[in-house]
Image (cartoon, rainbow, N blue to C red):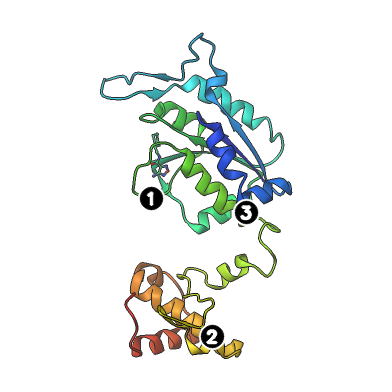
Amino acid sequence: MRFDVVTLFPEMIQEAATNGVTGKAIEQERVGLSVWNPRDYTHDKHRTVDDRPYGGGPGMLMKCQPLCDAVKDARKKNEKGDTKVVYMSPQGKQITQNLLIEASHLSQLILVAGRYEGVDERFINSVCDEEWSLGDYVISGGELAALVVIDAVTRLIPGVLGDDDSAKQDSYMDGLLDYPHFTRPEESELGVVPNVLLSGNHQLINRWRMKQALGRTALRRPDLLKVKELSAEQSALLEEFKNEIQDLD
Ligand code: 4GY
């Protein structure tokens, strides 16, 4: 899988993505990453990438031509296979883990990061396949949104996380919030670690964790529980949770 990011701030993507899990995946060539600056596709002496909006109003828009030419070049990195061009904006479809799982099967994801007041609508309609949103808030540019997508998709690529690692845990807890975690010391001024986690009984520990995940999801994100099918055991654990006095943390 390769990511291509069209951005006026390529160093923002390169700097951030070459750290941590994404950095290692790039080093190990499990994913590819290139950046494409629309400014490099301008032809005037001022290298103009923006222009004033028709109809007036504040701010500037990104012009179509440098964006189109940047995407065209990015596409050449993937002659065969499946490419999707995505514009990141609050007007898009809100991303979910399921949407990102689907994206992880593509051979190329071209992410377009807007700046200023956004891009000419014709670029979105004619060149982009989809428009995706992080959520209902506004940030100053699409770069951080593109980085979120790159990070979340990279974690889903086989071999990127250790085999016994969080990827499997994540799918085990599919559609639920995470359970609480504790590390040493066993006892401090901040409180004690739940006894079951010290028991060494992994069946009991797994049951406790599932009960906590179900209970927290019920308390904090009832919307997630409504769309999830619970097994008979999970329903029983959730009932147990509800019958115990719980911290509303
Ligand atoms: N929310 N989800 C988002 C965003 C910034 C100006 C258009 C979001 O994805 N992107 O807030 N983007 C704006 C900045 C150009 C995108």
User: Sequence-wise, which precedes: disc 1 or disc 2?
Assistant: 1
From the image, tell me which residue sits under label 3. 21
- In terms of image quadrants, where is residue 77? top right
What's the residue type where badge 2 is placed?
Answer: Leu
Q: Residue at x 45, y 86 (%)?
A: 237
Which residue is farthest top? Answer: 45
First in sequence: mark 3 vs mark 1: 3
Q: Which residue is mark 2?
A: 197
Q: Is residue 217 left or right of residue 196?
A: left
Q: For the residue marked with disc 3, what is the amino acid? A: Val
- Graded by Cα atoms within 10 Å as few (under 14), some (14 to 19) or many (20 or more), the crowding at tag 3 reads some
Query: Label 1: which residue?
Result: 135
Are the two marked residues, 1 and 2, in contact with CB atoms closer than 8 angstroms? no
Instruction: Give the residue drawn at x 64%, y 48%.
Output: 23
Indicate whether 2 appears above or below 182.
Answer: above
Dots 3, 1 in contact, CB < 8 A: no
Q: Label 2 near label 3: C-beta < 8 Å?
A: no
Location of the C terminus by quadrant is: bottom left
Real-space Cα separation, disc 1 to disc 2, in angstroms: 35 Å
Q: Is mark 1 within 8 Å of ligand 1?
A: yes
User: Gap in Å between the C-alphas at discs 3 and 2?
Assistant: 28 Å
Is residue 99 left or right of 162 when viewed as pictured?
A: left
